[in-house]
Image (cartoon, rainbow, N blue to C red):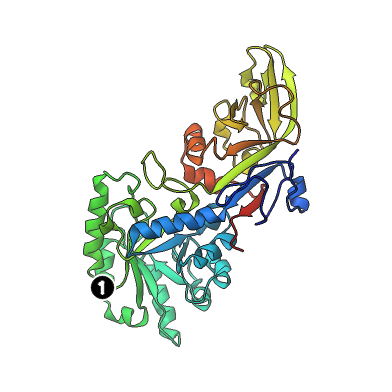
């Protein structure tokens, strides 16, 4: 049997320096949630630090900003952002002001926190009070921030985003020209950063990258001199001209390959395991799961594990994905349910896998990319969908 850990940096039996823990009968720090949870998500903070260092070396002399939106891609921004700050990061990006307000007390006073989506109308005073920098994506956002700055006792800096070709967020070329002519705006709103976002950075050969770079350079030249930021995770691995002054590392910090290369240079950060609830033997012709979408072609041993789509495990993996145990692939048979999945464990010796034992869903045998490929999606979606019901273990220090 295994004991599941949660919110712990304590060493785990079988885990060496920089390694994710191996499960065994050794005791783990416990709390009520850990005892009752059916799955364990292990997050390696040392791997996150190593990934930050790799990217920092790759883009130097540009500095690396950490994108910690969506609760650090689902892994816990309150734990991860301070670790990155300890590693030297001083620029952090979130999507919403609420995320920034939560993180602000956890970061060094000199750290810069940017809100990528800008501010909803009326949120400007709270943003200024928190010492957070909005990313101004439209003239209307800029107008509201300027109105506050004109009544504030000090100038209120902000970032400006330019739409260089992605058609998602940012000022259009015409809006850049309009803002550039408003000299009084910049007297009250110093430009802390001028940024844009690459649409195709994960495909290094895509000509759209060069086109966006050229447009960004031209538009940015119309604005007051400020640090420039264009590269996202994929952009960090494009030629150095894309790195500008600030490179924004997001999903790559959490172990996902930054582009389409086969050899992922990032260290894996997460491991997900789930416990067996029950095992049974079924005969030829027996159906499994909702809709009976799997029919046993012969005698099969079936294990039901304690994880489902309510925990972020994609329903599309029904009859497609797999779990692993002791190096053996265990196919998912039948549909993924809300709270459980059924596996064909016939390839495991009888008695080797039983109630309370853990199977691997993400780890050495099956990466995030593997799961995403089976599910017909991207690793980003798998990572950010992992639910709150998993017990969590943080290893690698960094409290």
The local secondary structure at tag 1 comes to helix
Q: Residue furthest bottom?
A: 153
Vertical side of 209 occupied by 370: above or below: above
Q: Position of residue 210 (x, y in %)?
A: 23, 52
Quadrant of the snapshot with the C terminus: bottom right
Instruction: Give the quadrant of residue 78.
Output: bottom right
Between 46 and 171, the one lying in front of the other is 46
Between 152 and 62, the one lying in front of the other is 62
Residue under the point 72% across and 17% down = 282
The answer to whether residue 110 of the structure is visible from this angle is yes
Between 112 and 82, the one lying in front of the other is 82
Quadrant of the snapshot with the N terminus: top right
155 relative to 322 in the view: left or right: left
Q: Position of residue 284 (x, y in %)?
A: 68, 11
In the picture of the structure, the residue carrying the numbered disc 1 is: 180
Residue under the point 77% across and 46% down = 36
Q: Position of residue 338 (x, y in %)?
A: 66, 37
Q: Are there few (<14), some (14-19), or many (20+) residues within 10 Å of tag 1? A: some
Q: Position of residue 79 (x, y in %)?
A: 59, 61
Residue under the point 42% across and 43% down = 264
Vertical side of 155 occupied by 96: above or below: above
């Amino acid at each position: 049997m295994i004991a599941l850990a949660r919110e712990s940096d304590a060493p785990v039996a079988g885990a060496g320096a920089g390694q994710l823990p191996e499960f065994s009968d050794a005791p783990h720090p416990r709390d009520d949630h850990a005892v009752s949870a059916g799955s364990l998500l292990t997050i390696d903070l040392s791997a996150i630090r190593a990934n930050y260092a790799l990217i920092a070396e790759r883009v130097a002399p540009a500095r690396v900003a950490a994108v910690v939106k969506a609760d650090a891609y689902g892994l816990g921004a309150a734990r991860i952002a301070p670790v990155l700050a300890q590693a030297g990061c001083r620029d952090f990006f979130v999507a919403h002001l609420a995320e920034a307000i939560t993180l602000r007390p956890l970061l060094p006073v000199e750290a810069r926190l940017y809100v990528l989506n800008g501010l909803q109308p009326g949120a400007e005073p709270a943003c200024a009070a928190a010492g957070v920098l909005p990313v101004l994506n439209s003239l209307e956002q800029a107008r509201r921030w300027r109105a506050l700055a004109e009544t504030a006792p000090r100038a209120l800096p902000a970032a400006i985003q330019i739409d260089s070709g992605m058609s998602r967020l940012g000022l259009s070329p015409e809006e850049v020209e309009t803002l550039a002519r408003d000299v009084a705006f910049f007297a009250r709103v110093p430009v802390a950063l001028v940024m844009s976002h690459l649409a195709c950075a994960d495909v290094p050969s895509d000509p759209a990258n060069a086109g966006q770079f050229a447009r960004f350079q031209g538009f940015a030249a119309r604005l007051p001199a400020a640090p420039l930021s264009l590269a996202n995770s994929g952009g960090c691995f494009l030629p150095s001209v894309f790195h500008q002054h600030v490179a924004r590392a997001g999903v790559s910090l959490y172990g996902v390959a930054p582009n389409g290369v086969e050899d992922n240079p990032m260290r894996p950060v997460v491991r997900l395991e789930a416990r067996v609830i029950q095992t049974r033997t079924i005969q030829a012709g027996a159906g499994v799961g909702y809709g009976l979408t799997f029919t046993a072609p012969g005698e099969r041993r079936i294990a039901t594990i304690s994880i489902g789509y309510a925990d972020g495990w994609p329903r599309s993996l029904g009859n497609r994905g797999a779990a692993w145990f002791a190096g053996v692939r265990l196919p998912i048979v039948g549909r993924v349910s809300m709270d459980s999945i059924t596996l064909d464990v016939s390839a495991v010796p009888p008695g080797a896998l039983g109630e309370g034992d853990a199977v691997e869903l993400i780890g050495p045998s099956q990466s995030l990319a593997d799961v995403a490929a089976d599910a017909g999606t991207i690793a980003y979606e798998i990572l950010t969908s992992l639910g709150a019901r998993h017990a969590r273990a943080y290893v690698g220090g960094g409290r």
